[in-house]
Amino acid sequence: MSGSQDHAQGHHAQGHHGESHATDHDAHEAPHGSLRGYVTGFVLSVILTAIPFWLVMADVLGNSTLTALVIMGFAAVQIVVHMIYFLHMNGRAEGGWSMMALIFTIIIVVIALSGSLWVMYHLNANMMPDMHRM
């Protein structure tokens, strides 16, 4: 063997017990965000919060059902922004955990949104019956 191959094998053999363990471990860690990524995510989150607030306060669309659907669309986009910029979920993660986390997140969001809408509809229909007569 040449000297460089021997050194490389010795370096690899020390990977579990020697100093090079830190560099082997660092190669498998999740990516960390940069300040620019966090600022971009924050700005997008503020915009995705301000637009629905404006839609409701200014009664821009004029139809409460349409407004609610648009707000839920903005909420879904904001979830994706949070997953990308703050949770650092992308296609490069190992073992398919990002896909499993995405599927789990989608299921939880669907349950939370549909359950919230169901509860609010039934509270409106059952708790305020006199309001419909006015």
Image: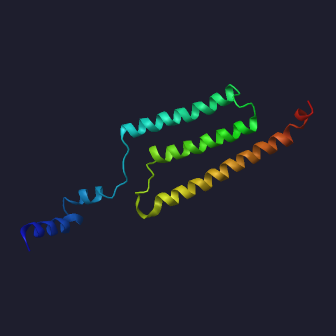
What x and y, as percent, mark residue 130?
91, 34
**In the rendering, at what x and y percent does residue 131 appear?**
88, 33
Q: Residue at x 12, y 69 (%)?
A: 5
Classify the position of the C terminus by image quarter.
Answer: top right
Using the rendered view, name the quadrant where residue 29 is placed: bottom left
Residue at 66% of width from left, 30% of height from top? Answer: 55
Q: Quadrant of residue 33?
A: top left
Q: Looking at the image, which residue sits at the far front?
A: 61
The residue lying furthest to the left in this view is 3
Report whether residue 107 is seen.
Answer: yes
Where is residue 1 shown, x and y percent of the image? 8, 74
* 58 is higher (above) or lower (below) than 103: above
Query: Residue 107: percent from the left, percent from the top?
Result: 61, 56
Count how many numbered circles sit on residues in the image: 0
List the single residue furthest toward the top: 58
The residue positioned 68% from the left and 30% from the top of the image is: 56
Q: Is residue 80 left or right of residue 70?
A: left
Q: Is residue 65 left or right of residue 6?
A: right
Q: Which residue is the extreme one toward the bottom?
A: 1
Seen in the image, is 80 located left or right of residue 5? Answer: right
Q: Which color scheme did the rendering employ for the protein?
A: rainbow
Q: Is residue 86 visible?
A: no
